[in-house]
Amino acid sequence: TEVAAALRTELPDYLVIGYPRTPDGVTRPTVALWQTVVRPVGDRWEVELDLWVLTGQEDPATADDVLDDALDAVIDALTKLPGLTWDQAERLVLDDKYQGYK
């Protein structure tokens, strides 16, 4: 997606995955995003994405600080993209293994 390409540019130290898959392993900050809903809105399309921010931290006790920094960087990058809005970031665990925000 265009959003994945823009995030790769804005976050060069991050792995950015632009399609639905669980990473084999998370060894550095990672953003996984994919399109989930497309709907017509007037004469344009509105697209919803699922976006995960992950780090290599699997222990919840040590993950929060690293995740907070990663989330801040991703939000900063997203706010630079014209026409893109977001509404929440929820702290979750992906596949019972990876600490992250969705």
Image (cartoon, rainbow, N blue to C red):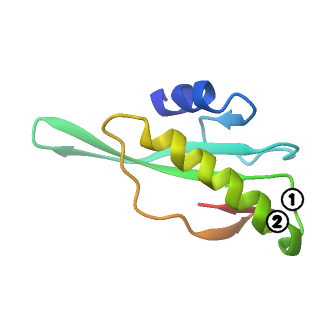
Relative depth, front residue between 30 and 24? 30
In the drawing, does residue 41 fall left or right of residue 57? left
In the rendered image, the vertical position of residue 96 relative to residue 17, given as above or below: below
In the rendered image, the vertical position of residue 67 relative to residue 84, given as above or below: below
The picture places residue 79, in percent across and down from the top left corner, at 43, 43
The picture places residue 68, in percent across and down from the top left corner, at 68, 61
Going by the numbered disc 2, the residue's amino acid type is Ala
In the rendered image, the vertical position of residue 26 relative to residue 5, given as above or below: below
The picture places residue 73, in percent across and down from the top left corner, at 62, 46
Q: Label 2 to label 1, Cα distance in Å? A: 5 Å
Label pair 2/1, CB-CB below 8 angstroms: yes
Residue matched to label 1: 57
Indicate the quadrant containing the C terminus: top left, top right, bottom left or bottom right: bottom right
Residue matched to label 2: 63
Q: Residue at x 66, y 36 (%)?
A: 17
Relative depth, front residue between 88 and 35? 88
